[in-house]
Image (cartoon, rainbow, N blue to C red):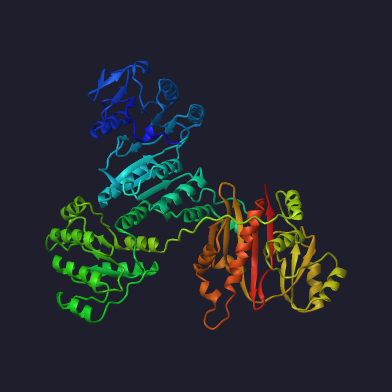
Amino acid sequence: MVNPLLIKPQSIVVVGGSDNTNKPGGKVLENLINGGFQNLYVLNPKSDTVQGIKCYSDIDSLPEIDLAILAIPARFCYDTVVNLSNKGTDSFIILSAGFGELNEEGKIIENKLVDFANKTGISILGPNCIGIINGYYKGAFTTPIPNYNPKGVDFISSSGSTAVFVMEAGMKMGMQFSSVYSVGNAIQIQVEDILEFFDSNYKKGESSDLIMLYIEQLSNPEKLLKHSRNLIEKGCNIVAVKAGLTDAGGRAASSHTGAMASPEIVVETLLKKAGIIQCYSREEMLYVAAVLFYGKPKGENVAIITHAGGAGVMCADALEKGGMEVPEIKGEKADELLAQLYTGSSVSNPIDFLATGTADQLGTIIDYCNNDFDEIDEMVVIFGSPGLFDVIDVYNLLSQKIDTSSKPVYPVLPSPVNTENAMEEFVKKGKIFFPDESILANAISKIYNKTPLFPLIDHKKKDTSETLTSIAKNAKNRYLNPEEVTKFLDFAGINQVPEYIAKSENELEKIISEIDFPIVMKVVGPIHKSDIGGVVLNINSSNKANKEFNRLIQIKDATSVMIQPMLKGIELFIGAKREDDLGHILMMGMGGIYLETIKDINSALSPVSPEEIDYLIKSLKTYKILKGARGSKGIGIKEFSNNILNLDKLLYSYNQISEIDINPLIATDKGIFAVDCRIRIDY
């Protein structure tokens, strides 16, 4: 829990403050002074005053302080925190490094600090962080310190250096900040805790509606999910980069779902459920945030207004690749606009008004896009300079039009040398610009195609079966046998292809006398049957069946052979893997050989609603195949959706299921049937 005095202290002591502003203790003190914080103290036994602030030689001589900022060696931090806490200080920022990120000794100090904080209820930010910058104080030891804007971006970062890099690049673009929080090693206060504070203290019209996150470790996914969704429902937009996606990429997984549920997929699934727009670099995050600053795209149709043909073409390519449209503009109004531009201009979209285009012409084009071209939803304006004339009047007009336009206008200013002064003036007017048109196009596409925020639901829990409960209890850390799997799928209401088990040739002969050819035969026992030749398709005779039975039963670890009628149709896949901190990651897509070749898979965090399932199915790249492409018959989409929902309800009833693969599901004229299923129980 974040103590409010950490955010808005009435008094601050810098422990280790100094005159040397090249050191953290000196720089944080300088920033606090320059930021105008008044009730400021320094604890440093070696000086009487530091940067004009009275120094105290020991903690006993200090008055009661709300917040202590520590810039002293790690080995002294624990005793200092304890003594200041006994004196009445409840909030601490530990800038110092040399803790768990360094060695085991540092980790021991961290653990002692956490134990003390938990026992006493104090708040600790850090250690190994750059501090806090907000509207109340500038408690960070870095530069630059951005100008405060309550409607600017709130930025929470696991990494102090990344926070600085993002601030520098963002300020260069014109981005303004409401606050910056660096959590460092996050021994107590984590990214999710700051987000919780934002949620609890959000005031519509006063708080920032734009939040950026740089996350290195997700310690409490449930808290992130809850408070992100709350903030988004209140009107916020949240953009995040999650680093370290491949750290656990080599985890052993014995099912398709387990192998596919990589750390990257797990994070992507969580952030989608939370309503967060996921980015993969600092630059992308800044572009997405800047687009949101100007307003979300209103539709898929973009007008590109440029005096640089090549840049316009690259922007158009990137937009269309991202699923947006750059529609042709034509007709009477288009001809009317063209007549007002220089000879050689084009208005078909991109609207190219040449290198000699003027501010008045740009204003006219934007007015036409607003008032006369109903097919246009938003505009990208690309205006640099070949060095022929000063563009200050163009950028002044562009700033005015952004303020008055009924449709979002996203300005690309790509000439950092020729237009440097004009760009600075543009930023001073409170505007953000984009240096690159293609990265902007990707950001626009990402925002427009963002997964909707579906309501969280709770399935009505089915009365659990005593038989299944008993199976789960006795199946710890193993895959279920075919008979047990059948009972779980029956309980879930997922139709199955009839299965017959043969342990001997006599049993095989009896089975094939009761079913029609062609049949499928599969070894029972080994997990990855196909990899070891344990699956035989399209068996059309008794002789072939006997021959294959004798081969399959000899495979290592084989216990029997499964026989099924061979169905023909479209192969599908559904599965799930339990993540202990999150719940089940549900996955679906094309199955069979397509599962590993096309890898067209969508995922969701369980539980899911029918609406969310329908969205996930329609978002598959192979959706046209599932619907029926080029005259071919598609599948029963509703039945596929119901199978996914039934699987989700099964997981809800039996949390002991750690992995489940139903691959393939065969969609035939008569319905959808599970052909092969693996269920693993772990608890």
Q: Please say if 527 is above or below 131.
A: below
The total of numbered circles placed on residues is 0
Residue 418 is situated, as x and y percent measured from the top left of the image, at 17, 57
Residue found 71% across the figure and 75% down from its top = 566
Report the side of 152 relative to 272 (left or right). left
Residue 239 is situated, as x and y percent measured from the top left of the image, at 39, 52
Residue found 26% across the figure and 64% down from its top = 406
One can see residue 160 in this view: no
Q: Nearer the viewer, residue 592 or 429?
A: 429
Q: Please say if 268 is above or below 374.
A: above
The furthest residue to the bottom: 631
Report the side of 477 relative to 444 (left or right). right
Image quadrant in which you'd find residue 216: top left
Residue 675 is situated, as x and y percent measured from the top left of the image, at 69, 68
Report the side of 300 relative to 53 (left or right). right
Image quadrant in which you'd find residue 299: bottom left
The furthest residue to the right: 506
Q: Nearer the viewer, residue 338 or 275?
A: 275
Residue 631 is situated, as x and y percent measured from the top left of the image, at 54, 83
One can see residue 646 in this view: yes
Q: Nearer the viewer, residue 666 or 370?
A: 370
